[in-house]
Image (tube, rainbow, N blue to C red):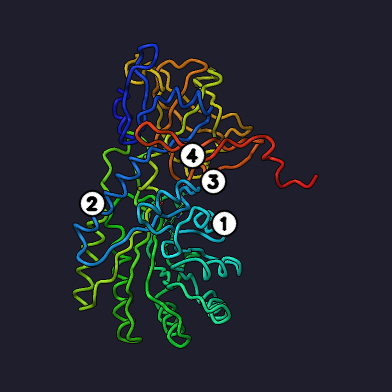
Protein backbone atom coordinates (compact mmCIF):
# COMPACT_ATOMS: atom_id res chain seq x y z
CA UNK A 1 0.00 0.00 0.00
CA UNK A 2 2.99 2.32 0.40
CA UNK A 3 4.53 1.51 -2.99
CA UNK A 4 3.15 4.64 -4.78
CA UNK A 5 5.18 6.77 -2.42
CA UNK A 6 8.40 5.47 -3.93
CA UNK A 7 7.71 7.44 -7.10
CA UNK A 8 7.79 10.67 -5.07
CA UNK A 9 11.45 9.97 -4.30
CA UNK A 10 14.42 10.88 -6.54
CA UNK A 11 14.91 8.96 -9.80
CA UNK A 12 17.73 6.93 -8.24
CA UNK A 13 15.67 5.58 -5.33
CA UNK A 14 16.26 1.90 -4.70
CA UNK A 15 15.58 -0.67 -2.02
CA UNK A 16 18.70 -2.63 -1.19
CA UNK A 17 19.57 -4.81 1.77
CA UNK A 18 21.35 -2.93 4.53
CA UNK A 19 24.00 -4.54 6.76
CA UNK A 20 21.37 -6.59 8.61
CA UNK A 21 19.90 -7.86 5.34
CA UNK A 22 16.71 -5.77 5.61
CA UNK A 23 15.70 -3.65 2.60
CA UNK A 24 16.42 0.02 3.18
CA UNK A 25 15.96 3.19 1.15
CA UNK A 26 18.90 4.16 -1.02
CA UNK A 27 19.21 7.37 -3.03
CA UNK A 28 22.06 8.32 -5.36
CA UNK A 29 23.63 4.94 -4.66
CA UNK A 30 23.80 5.52 -0.88
CA UNK A 31 21.96 3.97 2.05
CA UNK A 32 20.01 6.66 3.90
CA UNK A 33 20.90 4.93 7.22
CA UNK A 34 24.57 5.47 6.52
CA UNK A 35 24.10 9.08 5.50
CA UNK A 36 22.12 9.78 8.67
CA UNK A 37 24.82 8.09 10.76
CA UNK A 38 27.56 10.11 9.09
CA UNK A 39 25.93 13.55 8.96
CA UNK A 40 23.25 13.38 11.68
CA UNK A 41 19.56 14.27 11.40
CA UNK A 42 17.59 16.19 10.33
CA UNK A 43 19.51 15.81 7.07
CA UNK A 44 18.68 17.15 3.61
CA UNK A 45 20.03 15.20 0.66
CA UNK A 46 19.94 16.17 -3.02
CA UNK A 47 20.31 13.66 -5.82
CA UNK A 48 22.14 15.35 -8.69
CA UNK A 49 21.00 12.77 -11.21
CA UNK A 50 17.38 13.74 -10.58
CA UNK A 51 18.22 17.42 -11.05
CA UNK A 52 20.07 16.60 -14.28
CA UNK A 53 17.09 14.61 -15.53
CA UNK A 54 14.72 17.50 -14.85
CA UNK A 55 17.01 19.96 -16.66
CA UNK A 56 17.13 17.52 -19.56
CA UNK A 57 13.33 17.21 -19.58
CA UNK A 58 13.03 21.00 -19.96
CA UNK A 59 15.72 21.12 -22.64
CA UNK A 60 14.20 18.29 -24.65
CA UNK A 61 10.69 19.72 -24.41
CA UNK A 62 11.82 23.20 -25.41
CA UNK A 63 13.71 21.97 -28.45
CA UNK A 64 10.85 19.66 -29.46
CA UNK A 65 8.05 22.20 -29.11
CA UNK A 66 9.45 25.66 -29.81
CA UNK A 67 10.75 26.61 -33.22
CA UNK A 68 12.80 29.57 -31.97
CA UNK A 69 15.75 29.88 -29.57
CA UNK A 70 15.20 28.77 -25.97
CA UNK A 71 16.81 28.89 -22.55
CA UNK A 72 16.24 27.95 -18.91
CA UNK A 73 16.66 30.13 -15.85
CA UNK A 74 16.85 28.39 -12.48
CA UNK A 75 14.81 30.28 -9.87
CA UNK A 76 17.44 30.33 -7.15
CA UNK A 77 14.94 31.21 -4.45
CA UNK A 78 13.88 27.54 -4.45
CA UNK A 79 17.26 26.41 -3.11
CA UNK A 80 20.56 28.22 -3.35
CA UNK A 81 23.97 27.52 -1.90
CA UNK A 82 27.41 27.38 -3.50
CA UNK A 83 27.05 23.77 -4.62
CA UNK A 84 23.60 24.32 -6.14
CA UNK A 85 24.65 27.54 -7.88
CA UNK A 86 27.70 25.75 -9.35
CA UNK A 87 25.60 22.82 -10.46
CA UNK A 88 23.02 24.99 -12.23
CA UNK A 89 25.75 27.16 -13.72
CA UNK A 90 27.52 24.05 -15.04
CA UNK A 91 24.25 22.90 -16.64
CA UNK A 92 24.36 26.18 -18.56
CA UNK A 93 21.27 27.64 -16.88
CA UNK A 94 20.86 31.28 -15.98
CA UNK A 95 20.59 31.66 -12.21
CA UNK A 96 17.84 33.99 -11.01
CA UNK A 97 18.91 35.86 -7.89
CA UNK A 98 16.65 37.99 -5.73
CA UNK A 99 18.73 40.86 -4.45
CA UNK A 100 22.24 41.29 -3.13
CA UNK A 101 22.17 38.18 -0.93
CA UNK A 102 21.49 35.61 -3.62
CA UNK A 103 23.76 37.51 -6.02
CA UNK A 104 26.58 37.08 -3.52
CA UNK A 105 26.03 33.32 -3.42
CA UNK A 106 25.91 32.97 -7.20
CA UNK A 107 28.95 35.21 -7.74
CA UNK A 108 30.96 33.43 -5.06
CA UNK A 109 30.07 30.14 -6.72
CA UNK A 110 31.68 31.50 -9.88
CA UNK A 111 28.53 31.76 -11.99
CA UNK A 112 29.54 34.04 -14.88
CA UNK A 113 27.88 37.41 -15.22
CA UNK A 114 26.11 36.42 -18.43
CA UNK A 115 24.33 33.64 -16.51
CA UNK A 116 23.08 35.82 -13.65
CA UNK A 117 19.60 37.30 -13.79
CA UNK A 118 18.32 39.59 -11.07
CA UNK A 119 14.73 39.78 -9.87
CA UNK A 120 13.10 41.76 -7.09
CA UNK A 121 9.86 43.60 -6.47
CA UNK A 122 11.31 46.39 -4.35
CA UNK A 123 15.00 46.40 -5.11
CA UNK A 124 17.09 48.55 -2.79
CA UNK A 125 19.76 50.88 -4.11
CA UNK A 126 22.27 48.23 -3.08
CA UNK A 127 20.36 45.58 -5.02
CA UNK A 128 20.29 47.79 -8.09
CA UNK A 129 23.94 48.75 -7.83
CA UNK A 130 24.94 45.10 -7.52
CA UNK A 131 22.56 44.00 -10.26
CA UNK A 132 23.85 46.64 -12.65
CA UNK A 133 27.46 45.83 -11.89
CA UNK A 134 27.22 42.05 -11.79
CA UNK A 135 24.12 40.63 -13.47
CA UNK A 136 23.79 39.87 -17.17
CA UNK A 137 20.03 40.47 -17.10
CA UNK A 138 17.95 42.60 -14.77
CA UNK A 139 14.18 42.21 -14.63
CA UNK A 140 12.59 45.60 -13.95
CA UNK A 141 9.51 45.49 -11.75
CA UNK A 142 8.18 49.05 -11.99
CA UNK A 143 8.64 52.54 -13.43
CA UNK A 144 10.23 54.20 -10.37
CA UNK A 145 12.79 51.39 -10.41
CA UNK A 146 13.52 52.14 -14.05
CA UNK A 147 14.14 55.78 -13.19
CA UNK A 148 16.61 54.72 -10.49
CA UNK A 149 18.30 52.40 -12.96
CA UNK A 150 18.68 55.27 -15.42
CA UNK A 151 20.46 57.36 -12.75
CA UNK A 152 22.76 54.52 -11.79
CA UNK A 153 23.54 53.37 -15.31
CA UNK A 154 24.58 56.83 -16.31
CA UNK A 155 26.73 57.11 -13.22
CA UNK A 156 28.37 53.69 -13.66
CA UNK A 157 28.28 52.99 -17.35
CA UNK A 158 27.33 49.34 -16.90
CA UNK A 159 24.24 47.97 -18.55
CA UNK A 160 22.82 44.49 -18.16
CA UNK A 161 20.01 43.60 -20.53
CA UNK A 162 16.75 44.91 -19.08
CA UNK A 163 13.54 42.87 -19.19
CA UNK A 164 10.23 44.34 -18.11
CA UNK A 165 8.02 42.41 -15.72
CA UNK A 166 4.45 42.41 -17.01
CA UNK A 167 1.49 42.01 -14.65
CA UNK A 168 -0.83 40.07 -16.93
CA UNK A 169 -3.93 40.28 -14.75
CA UNK A 170 -4.24 36.51 -14.39
CA UNK A 171 -2.89 34.35 -11.57
CA UNK A 172 -2.63 30.58 -11.67
CA UNK A 173 -4.67 28.36 -9.40
CA UNK A 174 -2.53 27.88 -6.29
CA UNK A 175 -2.41 28.95 -2.65
CA UNK A 176 -3.16 32.69 -2.55
CA UNK A 177 0.24 33.42 -0.95
CA UNK A 178 1.84 32.11 -4.14
CA UNK A 179 -0.29 34.01 -6.67
CA UNK A 180 1.51 36.85 -8.43
CA UNK A 181 -0.11 37.58 -11.80
CA UNK A 182 -3.51 38.97 -10.71
CA UNK A 183 -4.51 42.53 -11.60
CA UNK A 184 -3.98 43.85 -8.06
CA UNK A 185 -0.74 41.97 -7.35
CA UNK A 186 2.29 43.84 -6.02
CA UNK A 187 4.43 42.44 -8.84
CA UNK A 188 5.12 43.95 -12.25
CA UNK A 189 3.55 46.52 -14.57
CA UNK A 190 0.31 46.55 -16.54
CA UNK A 191 0.34 46.88 -20.33
CA UNK A 192 0.21 50.70 -20.40
CA UNK A 193 3.03 50.95 -17.88
CA UNK A 194 5.10 48.54 -19.98
CA UNK A 195 4.60 50.77 -23.01
CA UNK A 196 5.71 53.78 -20.96
CA UNK A 197 8.69 51.76 -19.73
CA UNK A 198 9.80 50.92 -23.27
CA UNK A 199 9.41 54.57 -24.27
CA UNK A 200 11.47 55.60 -21.22
CA UNK A 201 14.21 53.13 -22.17
CA UNK A 202 14.23 54.38 -25.75
CA UNK A 203 14.52 58.00 -24.60
CA UNK A 204 17.29 57.13 -22.17
CA UNK A 205 19.17 54.64 -24.36
CA UNK A 206 18.60 51.81 -21.90
CA UNK A 207 19.01 48.33 -23.39
CA UNK A 208 15.51 46.93 -22.92
CA UNK A 209 15.47 43.53 -24.64
CA UNK A 210 12.86 41.32 -23.02
CA UNK A 211 9.51 40.82 -21.33
CA UNK A 212 8.80 38.63 -18.34
CA UNK A 213 5.71 37.50 -16.48
CA UNK A 214 5.13 35.04 -13.65
CA UNK A 215 1.61 34.20 -12.56
CA UNK A 216 2.33 32.21 -9.44
CA UNK A 217 3.99 29.12 -8.13
CA UNK A 218 2.96 25.45 -7.90
CA UNK A 219 0.16 25.09 -10.43
CA UNK A 220 -0.80 21.89 -12.19
CA UNK A 221 -2.71 22.72 -15.38
CA UNK A 222 -0.57 24.15 -18.17
CA UNK A 223 -3.56 25.90 -19.84
CA UNK A 224 -3.59 28.36 -16.95
CA UNK A 225 -0.70 30.19 -18.63
CA UNK A 226 -2.68 30.82 -21.83
CA UNK A 227 -4.79 33.86 -20.85
CA UNK A 228 -1.66 35.63 -19.61
CA UNK A 229 0.20 34.66 -22.75
CA UNK A 230 -2.60 36.25 -24.80
CA UNK A 231 -2.29 39.48 -22.85
CA UNK A 232 1.48 39.53 -23.34
CA UNK A 233 1.25 38.72 -27.07
CA UNK A 234 -1.20 41.55 -27.65
CA UNK A 235 1.10 43.82 -25.64
CA UNK A 236 3.91 42.81 -28.01
CA UNK A 237 1.65 43.73 -30.93
CA UNK A 238 1.02 47.17 -29.39
CA UNK A 239 4.69 47.68 -28.63
CA UNK A 240 5.57 46.95 -32.20
CA UNK A 241 2.97 49.37 -33.50
CA UNK A 242 3.38 52.16 -30.94
CA UNK A 243 7.10 51.94 -30.19
CA UNK A 244 8.54 49.91 -33.07
CA UNK A 245 9.96 47.56 -30.44
CA UNK A 246 9.61 43.84 -29.80
CA UNK A 247 11.30 41.54 -27.30
CA UNK A 248 14.32 39.43 -28.12
CA UNK A 249 13.51 37.32 -25.06
CA UNK A 250 10.24 36.38 -23.42
CA UNK A 251 10.00 34.62 -20.09
CA UNK A 252 6.71 33.09 -18.93
CA UNK A 253 8.26 32.69 -15.47
CA UNK A 254 8.15 29.43 -13.60
CA UNK A 255 5.61 27.90 -11.30
CA UNK A 256 5.08 24.44 -12.76
CA UNK A 257 4.00 22.25 -9.84
CA UNK A 258 5.08 18.86 -8.56
CA UNK A 259 3.43 15.97 -6.72
CA UNK A 260 4.17 16.05 -3.00
CA UNK A 261 1.88 13.24 -1.94
CA UNK A 262 0.69 10.01 -3.53
CA UNK A 263 -2.77 11.61 -3.87
CA UNK A 264 -1.19 14.15 -6.28
CA UNK A 265 -0.20 11.36 -8.69
CA UNK A 266 -0.20 11.10 -11.64
CA UNK A 267 1.08 14.61 -12.33
CA UNK A 268 1.24 16.23 -15.78
CA UNK A 269 4.79 16.21 -17.06
CA UNK A 270 7.26 19.03 -17.65
CA UNK A 271 6.90 18.23 -21.33
CA UNK A 272 3.11 18.78 -21.23
CA UNK A 273 3.64 22.15 -19.60
CA UNK A 274 6.37 23.31 -21.99
CA UNK A 275 4.48 22.02 -25.04
CA UNK A 276 1.38 24.03 -24.13
CA UNK A 277 3.26 27.27 -23.50
CA UNK A 278 5.61 26.93 -26.49
CA UNK A 279 2.90 26.07 -28.99
CA UNK A 280 0.62 28.91 -27.85
CA UNK A 281 3.43 31.45 -27.98
CA UNK A 282 4.66 30.40 -31.41
CA UNK A 283 1.14 30.39 -32.82
CA UNK A 284 0.10 33.70 -31.35
CA UNK A 285 3.24 35.55 -32.48
CA UNK A 286 3.18 34.14 -35.99
CA UNK A 287 -0.46 35.24 -36.29
CA UNK A 288 0.78 38.78 -35.47
CA UNK A 289 3.66 38.23 -37.97
CA UNK A 290 6.15 38.90 -35.20
CA UNK A 291 9.59 37.26 -34.93
CA UNK A 292 9.88 34.57 -32.26
CA UNK A 293 11.74 35.77 -29.17
CA UNK A 294 13.95 33.45 -27.14
CA UNK A 295 11.59 31.49 -24.91
CA UNK A 296 13.24 31.55 -21.49
CA UNK A 297 11.44 29.39 -18.91
CA UNK A 298 12.18 30.04 -15.24
CA UNK A 299 11.41 27.01 -13.09
CA UNK A 300 12.55 26.43 -9.52
CA UNK A 301 10.52 23.75 -7.78
CA UNK A 302 10.05 21.44 -10.77
CA UNK A 303 13.85 21.28 -11.24
CA UNK A 304 14.79 20.37 -7.71
CA UNK A 305 11.90 19.53 -5.36
CA UNK A 306 11.87 15.81 -6.09
CA UNK A 307 15.67 15.61 -5.98
CA UNK A 308 15.57 16.47 -2.28
CA UNK A 309 14.76 14.18 0.65
CA UNK A 310 14.60 15.18 4.31
CA UNK A 311 15.63 12.50 6.81
CA UNK A 312 14.42 12.77 10.38
CA UNK A 313 14.76 10.57 13.45
CA UNK A 314 11.74 9.70 15.54
CA UNK A 315 12.47 10.73 19.11
CA UNK A 316 9.15 9.88 20.75
CA UNK A 317 6.07 7.88 19.85
CA UNK A 318 3.05 9.11 21.78
CA UNK A 319 -0.67 8.49 21.89
CA UNK A 320 -3.00 11.40 22.75
CA UNK A 321 -6.74 11.10 22.27
CA UNK A 322 -7.21 9.32 18.95
CA UNK A 323 -3.88 10.40 17.62
CA UNK A 324 -0.65 8.50 17.15
CA UNK A 325 2.10 11.10 17.33
CA UNK A 326 5.55 10.54 15.84
CA UNK A 327 7.71 13.33 17.23
CA UNK A 328 10.69 14.10 15.00
CA UNK A 329 13.94 15.98 15.48
CA UNK A 330 12.99 18.59 12.86
CA UNK A 331 9.80 20.35 11.87
CA UNK A 332 8.63 23.88 11.17
CA UNK A 333 12.12 25.37 11.61
CA UNK A 334 13.39 23.49 8.54
CA UNK A 335 10.03 23.16 6.76
CA UNK A 336 7.47 25.91 7.32
CA UNK A 337 5.46 24.91 4.22
CA UNK A 338 2.78 22.81 5.98
CA UNK A 339 2.16 25.66 8.47
CA UNK A 340 2.27 28.41 5.85
CA UNK A 341 0.47 26.81 2.91
CA UNK A 342 -1.13 23.68 4.38
CA UNK A 343 1.28 21.74 2.14
CA UNK A 344 0.59 18.02 2.27
CA UNK A 345 3.61 15.71 2.38
CA UNK A 346 4.12 11.97 2.59
CA UNK A 347 6.80 9.81 4.23
CA UNK A 348 8.32 6.35 4.41
CA UNK A 349 10.41 4.66 7.07
CA UNK A 350 13.98 4.21 5.85
CA UNK A 351 14.10 0.58 6.95
CA UNK A 352 11.83 -2.01 5.40
CA UNK A 353 9.59 0.75 4.01
CA UNK A 354 7.13 -1.26 1.94
CA UNK A 355 6.49 -4.64 3.51
CA UNK A 356 5.41 -3.96 7.05
CA UNK A 357 1.78 -4.66 7.88
CA UNK A 358 -0.36 -1.51 7.86
CA UNK A 359 -2.06 -0.57 11.11
CA UNK A 360 -5.40 1.15 11.45
CA UNK A 361 -4.10 4.19 13.30
CA UNK A 362 -2.75 6.90 11.02
CA UNK A 363 0.28 8.89 12.14
CA UNK A 364 0.71 12.60 12.90
CA UNK A 365 4.28 13.73 12.35
CA UNK A 366 5.34 16.77 14.36
CA UNK A 367 8.58 18.50 15.27
CA UNK A 368 10.15 19.50 18.59
CA UNK A 369 9.19 23.20 18.54
CA UNK A 370 6.89 24.95 20.97
CA UNK A 371 3.96 25.45 18.61
CA UNK A 372 1.00 23.21 17.94
CA UNK A 373 1.36 24.36 14.31
CA UNK A 374 4.73 22.60 14.19
CA UNK A 375 3.19 19.79 12.24
CA UNK A 376 4.87 18.23 9.21
CA UNK A 377 2.28 15.65 8.18
CA UNK A 378 -1.26 15.03 9.40
CA UNK A 379 -3.09 11.78 9.32
CA UNK A 380 -0.74 9.65 7.22
CA UNK A 381 -1.08 5.87 6.90
CA UNK A 382 2.16 4.39 8.25
CA UNK A 383 3.04 1.05 9.80
CA UNK A 384 4.07 0.73 13.46
CA UNK A 385 7.09 2.99 13.92
CA UNK A 386 9.49 2.76 16.82
CA UNK A 387 11.47 5.35 18.71
CA UNK A 388 14.87 5.83 17.08
CA UNK A 389 13.70 4.96 13.57
CA UNK A 390 14.49 7.14 10.58
CA UNK A 391 11.72 8.60 8.42
CA UNK A 392 12.30 10.02 4.96
CA UNK A 393 10.09 12.80 3.58
CA UNK A 394 10.33 13.02 -0.21
CA UNK A 395 9.95 16.13 -2.40
CA UNK A 396 11.86 18.21 0.13
CA UNK A 397 14.20 19.98 -2.28
CA UNK A 398 12.41 23.31 -2.82
CA UNK A 399 11.54 26.22 -0.51
CA UNK A 400 12.17 24.31 2.72
CA UNK A 401 15.68 25.21 3.79
CA UNK A 402 15.43 28.58 2.06
CA UNK A 403 12.64 29.50 4.46
CA UNK A 404 14.26 27.80 7.47
CA UNK A 405 14.64 29.60 10.78
CA UNK A 406 16.42 29.33 14.10
CA UNK A 407 13.13 29.25 15.98
CA UNK A 408 13.57 27.83 19.47
CA UNK A 409 17.32 27.87 18.79
CA UNK A 410 16.93 25.31 16.02
CA UNK A 411 20.13 24.59 14.09
CA UNK A 412 19.79 24.49 10.31
CA UNK A 413 20.39 20.97 8.99
CA UNK A 414 23.36 19.78 6.99
CA UNK A 415 22.88 19.49 3.21
CA UNK A 416 24.58 16.83 1.12
CA UNK A 417 24.72 16.36 -2.63
CA UNK A 418 24.84 12.83 -4.04
CA UNK A 419 26.00 11.59 -7.39
CA UNK A 420 26.63 7.94 -8.30
CA UNK A 421 27.41 6.97 -4.73
CA UNK A 422 29.69 9.96 -4.14
CA UNK A 423 28.66 12.24 -1.27
CA UNK A 424 29.58 15.89 -1.05
CA UNK A 425 28.76 17.88 2.07
CA UNK A 426 27.35 21.11 0.61
CA UNK A 427 26.46 22.84 3.88
CA UNK A 428 27.46 21.77 7.37
CA UNK A 429 24.91 21.66 10.15
CA UNK A 430 24.71 24.86 12.17
CA UNK A 431 26.23 24.79 15.63
CA UNK A 432 25.10 26.57 18.78
CA UNK A 433 27.96 29.01 18.24
CA UNK A 434 26.45 30.00 14.88
CA UNK A 435 23.46 31.26 16.86
CA UNK A 436 25.71 33.89 18.45
CA UNK A 437 27.49 35.03 15.28
CA UNK A 438 25.55 38.30 14.99
CA UNK A 439 25.40 39.09 18.67
CA UNK A 440 27.65 41.80 20.05
CA UNK A 441 29.34 40.41 23.17
N1 LIG B 1 10.07 33.26 -11.26
C1 LIG B 1 9.63 34.14 -10.35
C2 LIG B 1 9.60 35.56 -10.70
C3 LIG B 1 9.20 33.71 -9.10
O1 LIG B 1 8.77 34.59 -8.21
C4 LIG B 1 9.26 32.33 -8.78
C5 LIG B 1 8.82 31.87 -7.48
C6 LIG B 1 9.72 31.44 -9.76
C7 LIG B 1 10.11 31.94 -11.00
C8 LIG B 1 9.84 29.96 -9.55
O2 LIG B 1 8.63 29.36 -9.24
P1 LIG B 1 8.60 27.76 -9.11
O3 LIG B 1 8.92 27.20 -10.45
O4 LIG B 1 9.63 27.37 -8.10
O5 LIG B 1 7.22 27.46 -8.64
N2 LIG B 1 7.55 29.53 -0.89
C9 LIG B 1 6.56 29.02 -1.82
C10 LIG B 1 6.92 29.31 -3.26
C11 LIG B 1 7.14 30.77 -3.56
C12 LIG B 1 7.58 31.01 -4.97
C13 LIG B 1 8.09 32.38 -5.18
N3 LIG B 1 8.42 32.67 -6.53
C14 LIG B 1 6.37 27.53 -1.57
O6 LIG B 1 7.08 26.99 -0.72
O7 LIG B 1 5.53 26.89 -2.18
Q: Name the side, left or right, on which 108 lies relative to 64.
A: right
Disc 4 versus disc 3: nearer the observer: 3
Helix or strand or loop: what does disc 2 sit on? helix
Give 70 or 107, whichever is nearer the viewer. Answer: 107
Helix or strand or loop: what does disc 4 sit on? helix
Q: In terms of sequence position, does the residue under pointer 2 or pointer 1 come before the other?
A: 1
Measured Cα–Cα span from mark 2 to mark 1 = 34 Å
Q: Position of residue 428 (x, y in %)?
A: 56, 37
Q: Is mark 3 within 8 Å of ligand 1?
A: yes
Q: In terms of sequence position, does the residue under pointer 3 or pointer 2 come before the other?
A: 2
Q: In terms of sequence position, does the residue under pointer 2 or pointer 4 come before the other?
A: 2
Measured Cα–Cα span from mark 1 to mark 3 = 14 Å
Q: Quadrant of residue 278?
A: bottom left
- Residue 101 shows which numbered tag? 1
- Residue 272 shows which numbered tag? 2
Figure disc tally: 4
Q: Mark 3 highlights which residue?
A: 403
Amino acid sequence: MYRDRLSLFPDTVALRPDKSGQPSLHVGGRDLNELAAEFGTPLYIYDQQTIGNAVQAYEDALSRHYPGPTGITYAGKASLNLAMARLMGAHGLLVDCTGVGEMHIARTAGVPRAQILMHGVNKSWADLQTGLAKAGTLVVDNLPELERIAQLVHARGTTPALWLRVRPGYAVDTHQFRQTGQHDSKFGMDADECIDAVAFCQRNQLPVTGLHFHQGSHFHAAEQVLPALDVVCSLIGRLQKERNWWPQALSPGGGWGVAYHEADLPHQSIEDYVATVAAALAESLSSHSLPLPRLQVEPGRSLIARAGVAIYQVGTVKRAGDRRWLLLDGGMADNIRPALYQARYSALPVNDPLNRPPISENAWLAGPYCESGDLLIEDLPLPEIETGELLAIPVSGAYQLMMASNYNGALRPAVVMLRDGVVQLAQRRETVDDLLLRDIV
